Every structure is written in C-alpha cells, then in structure tokens.
Amino acid sequence: MPRTAPSEAKLREIVAKIPTPFHLYDAAGIRANVDALQQAFAWNPGFKEYFAVKATPNAAILKLLKDQGCGVDCSSYTELLLSDAMGFKGHDIMFSSNVTSAEEYRLARKLGVLINLDDISHIDFLAENGGIPEEICLRYNPGGDFKLGTRVMGDPGDAKYGLTPAQMPVAINRLKELGVKRFGIHAFLASNTTDGGYYPALAKILFQLAVDLAEECDAEFFLINLSGGIGIPYEPGQPNADLTAIGAQVEVAYQETIVAAGMDPVAVVTELGRYITGPNAWLVATALHHKDTHKQYVGLDASAVNLLRPAMYGAYHHITVAGKEDAPLDHVYDVTGSLCENNDKFAIDRPLPEIEIGDLVVLHDTGAHGHSMGYNYNGKLRSAEVLLEEDGSFRMIRRAETPRDYFATIAGFEVTEDLGKPELDPLLHDPVNNA
Ligand SMILES: *Cc1c(COP(=O)(O)O)cnc(C)c1O
C-alpha cells in the first residue's frame, strides 16, 4: 500500500513558499526503512547498505543516509564526485558501473573505492587506467532465466551486465596474478520485486559460487553484494517486502554455505535504492486545466520530465488529491502533463475524486528513480526537491531549474539579464531554507 501523503494543510504551507511541482521527501520514512534493513541483517557483522545513488542523487539525502551508517553505490563519474564531496570515503563507496570510461576508473582508483567489475575485458583496462587494487568485486551473470520455483523473476541471459559462469574463474586467476588478495561477488537478477524469495535465492547462488570459486581458484572472499531489486508496493493492496523474513532466510543460506565451508566471516551487503527512498516521497503538482473531449483529462503543471516511470514503463503511481483523500472516486480521468508526447500521462482511466482547477494532485512513491530520471524535453525545467523533517519543518534541498540553467550550455546563445526577470522566470525564487 502506498504511503499516505502529508495533509493538505502541510502541503499548502509548503506550496506558499515553494511553487509546484516539487518532489517532497520524508526524512523519517527514509530513516525507518534504513533501520528495518539494518535490523534484518544485524546477524552479519559486515553488513552495509550501499545506497544506489542513481535513485536519488541529492546531497541532503546522501548526508541523511551517511548519518544512518550507509555507504553509497555509484555508477558514474558525477556520482563518485557527489559521494566523495558528501564525505563517503574508500570502501564506503561501491562503484558498480558498466561500459566504464578510463576517466571513471582513474577517479575510482584515486578515491580508493571498492570497484565492482562488470566485464572480464575490464581487468586489463583497469590495470592501464588507475591500476588493480588488492580488493575487488566481480559482477556475476548466470545467464538463462532466473526462476523462483516456476515463476520467472528475471532474464539474466538477455542482460548486458556481468561475467558468465565460465569467465568467473578465469577472471579471478588473472586478477590474482595482478595482485588481488581478496574478492567480492555481486549480482542483480530481478528488479522491483516484493517477493520475499528473491534475496534468499540470490544469496544462495552467490554464497555457493563463492564457496566453489574459493576452492577452484584458491581465492579468498570477503564480500557478497546482493545489490538492489527489493521492490515497493506501488499499487494499493500490494504487500510490503518482509525484510525481517528475508534477512532471516539469507542467514540460513549463509549458515548452510559460507559457515559450513569454514569461510565465515564474509560481509553481506546490499545496494538498495528504491526500497529506501521510493515510498518516502511524493511529487506534488497543481491541476491546471480540464479538457473534455473523447476522454476526460486533467492537466498538471508536472509532466513526464518530472516523473518518467509511467511514460517509460507504463508504471503505476498512486494518485491522491490533497484534502479529498476520503472523497468518493466517482470520476475517471487521464491525468496528463504538457509534453508534446501522448505517452505523457501519469494515469489512464483512473478513478479519482472530482478534481478542481488549483487542487494539489499528489503522485506517490516518487522518491527513487523519480527526479533523478528527469530531463529537459520540450524545454521543460527540472523541479525542486524538498525535505520534510519529523518535526514538520521543511527545506528546499534542490532548487528548480530556471531558463538560465536551460540555456547555459548552448553555444553562441547569450544568457542576458532578461532571462532572470521574474515574468520570464517564474520558478526563480530565493532559496527557502526553512519553514
Ligand atoms: C539500479 C541499481 C541498484 C538499485 O536498484 P533498486 O531497484 O533501486 O534497488 C543497485 N545496484 C545497481 C548496480 C544498480 O544498477
């Protein structure tokens, strides 16, 4: 079940200072999900959550997560820079990239982060671009279908990531020659699943693989990375993932493999993004127009550039209308943005309460892969991000883009003072630091 949004009064208080649209993050909810994860894996002394930065690359969110004892998982040059600037150091940063550039590997080595190699060909590439560290992680791809019982959970055989089973020992032997002393294994085989069987099944595969490779290659393993993939209930009635049960079942698998083989202790780590921040933010928008043609439309001041998932994946995002949470769902609307793209719809044929112009329309579960997947099509500008604290105070943690930002990279286009004029630049406003 999607989380309840803050009250209309609270949203109106924020909107009085920060114009819609914006993503509103709930600090307490994010902390609670980190706590639940850490408690579920407390049996493993080396456990660490490496938050997937790509889900919510915001300095204030990373700071909050660092204070909770998290590390970060980066996939690019700028994510490494952001994480380093926020105080994550050395092995508190996992670098799970693919199609990695020389520049990225050089920065990763300079920062001393834990590198998760995506391909066997990257061994020599890394050796030439930054050098091989003493501890390294390898991304594994078993191929075929990934099944839980009879259910197909993922399709690794079609995924671009990772090394094949046959490549794993070859890579380990080569890395040992180049000076690697200790290894980690990573795999990401199913995405956005609330199925409690996923992590335990994945853990079993990776623990057993580590046991087998330790023997075959006479190699030492210090870390198993279960990566991301734990999903959230985007739809009403969908269950939450049961982290306590998941952690306990991973522990059973750990006992049966790692402990039984005498390899304990090995750190078990995660790289969750969606589970941590996904349910704990809302995209708050204003209803701008009604349109009554072949269908009934409500047009918002937000569009797919602010939340791409519905347009890109047909993903469901729950929608409520501030102050009308208990009103009957007696209207059916397509809820749209303003892009010149017919897939710019947050919902199609969605039963909702009657929406009036000026209503605050709230899209739920936008905290992960929401703002971060934003873009500038149709000259649209990325929105602000706002952090709501437990005591009800709030602060802007990213301002909205302005036309100046949009034009700044165009060669030969002079960014004049006019572009900063309020009438041309309705989103430019003084940073609001607190309520
Ligand atoms: C995207 C990603 C994650 C996070 O995935 P979620 O679905 O947000 O949990 C973790 N690790 C890697 C390598 C990723 O690409």
Image: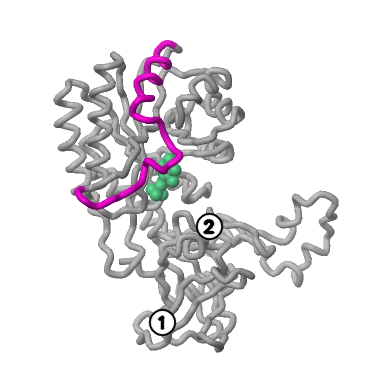
Bounds of the magenta segment: 149-177
Question: Which numbered dot is residue 352?
Answer: 1
Relative to 398, 244 lies left or right = left
Give the quarter of the figure containing the N terminus: bottom left
Q: Amino acid at mark 2?
A: His
Question: Which residue lies at the image location 65% right of the left edge and 64% below the top edge?
Answer: 380
Where 133 falls versus 355 (above or below)?
above
Q: Is residue 305 magenta?
A: no
Which quarter of the figure has residue 100?
top right
State the residue position of label 2. Answer: 371
Q: Is residue 295 above or below residue 255?
A: below
Q: In the image, residue 88 lies at what x, y percent?
A: 47, 35
- Closer to the camera in the image, 47 or 133: 133
For this view, does 316 lie left or right of residue 226?
Answer: right
| Residue 428 seen in render | no
Above-or-below relation of 298 to 410: below
